[in-house]
Image (cartoon, rainbow, N blue to C red):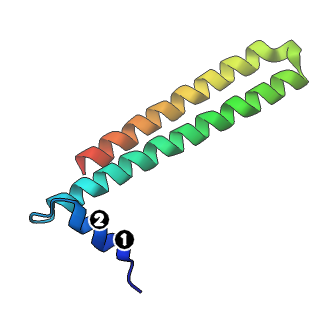
Amino acid sequence: MSFPVIGLLQAAAEVSNGAGLATLGKAVGAGVAVIGAGLGIGRIGGNMTESMARQPEIAAQIQTGALILAALIEGAALFGLVIALLA
């Protein structure tokens, strides 16, 4: 099974000893890391808002926990970006 998109990407990238495909792989890896972090932080924000609406008396605790989780996701995304760009 052949994907015609791969041929187009190879033609579009400056392929000289595989350097173009390596650059394309780095871009895809960085994009996946950023998309994953965006989805994770968006989910945290949505669930935080819903839980704060259900129990407003513990909104400060929920907000603190959500902020810590968002920071951990950002750190993981940063590591993913660095690994993608160094590979």
Residue 30 — which label?
none
Q: Residues within 10 Å of mark 1 (few under 14, many from 20)?
A: few
Image vertical order of residue 79 relative to residue 29, above or below: above
Label 1 sits on residue: 5
| x 32%, y 48%: residue | 84
What kind of residue is marked 1?
A: Val
Q: Is residue 82 left or right of residue 55?
A: left
Image vertical order of residue 17 relative to residue 54, above or below: below
Q: Is residue 79 left or right of residue 12?
A: right
Res 41 quadrant in image:
top right
Q: Is residue 70 left or right of residue 9?
A: right
List the single residue furthest toward the bottom: 1
| x 67%, y 38%: residue | 43
Image vertical order of residue 81 relative to residue 87, above or below: above
Residue nearest the viewer, comparing 10 with 56: 10
What kind of residue is marked 2?
A: Leu
| x 28%, y 56%: residue | 24
Q: Is residue 59 left or right of residue 30?
A: right
Residue nearest the viewer, comparing 13 with 74: 13
Q: Residues within 10 Å of mark 2 (few under 14, many from 20)?
A: some
Q: Position of residue 53 (x, y in %)?
A: 86, 22
Res 83 quadrant in image:
top left
Label 2 sits on residue: 9
Q: Are marks 2 and 1 in contact (CB under 8 Å)?
A: yes
Quadrant for the N terminus, please: bottom left
Q: Position of residue 57 (x, y in %)?
A: 88, 13
